[in-house]
Image: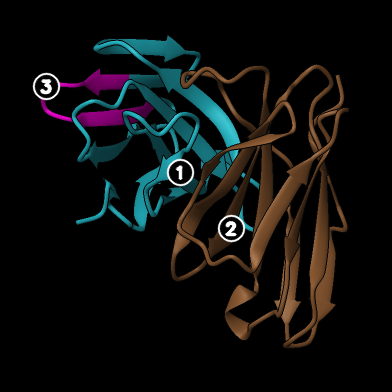
Chain colours: A cyan, B brown
Amino acid sequence: QKEVEQNSGPLSVPEGAIASLNCTYSDRGSQSFFWYRQYSGKSPELIMSIYSNGDKEDGRFTAQLNKASQYVSLLIRDSQPSDSATYLCAVVPSGSARQLTFGSGTQLTVLP
Amino acid sequence: KAGVTQTPRYLIKTRGQQVTLSCSPISGHRSVSWYQQTPGQGLQFLFEYFSETQRNKGNFPGRFSGRQFSNSRSEMNVSTLELGDSALYLCASSFSQGAGETQYFGPGTRLLVL
């Protein structure tokens, strides 16, 4: 069983819609969670970090964390074609210091 | 503040050769981590250095090694290259060693092994 699971997609949404990206993780002791965006041929770029249960908002992006359900999600409001990319969920499992464990990524396409 | 830099950006090698990749972290960052990204395996952790010491190592063979210098710059070396080592190698830096510290990625070095 993979430690971090994401729907691989592809996920397509129309411009202006809400895109919802989901991630589950297996290590209940994980404390740090990150969402990265990766454009084709580029390196991952941090979008959000979240450490506590609940929602964290930054502009059009909202990260949601539910440690009891071992679930973290990313909502993108008013999606734009420039949001089309692969979104990577990353978790720092307990006892692994700074090792980021990544999901396989969800490819998002925002249709104009 | 300048971001993480990696050199070279692209590299072509043949099987059996060795390669050294370089990473300069964001100024003031002392932790450097290396990751390998392939289409089949995704992003996988290689190792992490802090204050010139390897603090954590992923599940890769001993052909993969690294080091960190006193100015926090880091190098990774892959010996006896195999076709499967073709990948994007990413370096990430962070300010300290805290588990919650955000890691910022460099542009990567794309290695092709023929």
| Residue A91 image offset from top left, x and y in percent | 38, 34
Q: Mark 2 lies on which chain?
A: B
| Residue B75 image offset from top left, x and y in percent | 80, 49
Q: Which amino acid, by three-letter code, is at mark 1?
A: Tyr
Q: What main secondary structure does the magenta stretch of the protein show? A: strand
Give the number of the mark in front: 3 or 1.
3
| Residue A24 image offset from top left, x and y in percent | 22, 39
User: Which region is colored magenta?
Assistant: A64-76
Badge 2 element: strand
Label disc, if present, on residue A68 of the rendered structure = 3
Q: Quadrant of residue B72?
A: top right
Q: How far apart are marks 3 and 1 (CA)?
A: 23 Å
Q: Which amino acid, by three-letter code, is at mark 3?
A: Ala
For disc 1, the marked residue is A87
Label disc, if present, on residue B36 of the rendered structure = 2
Badge 3 element: loop
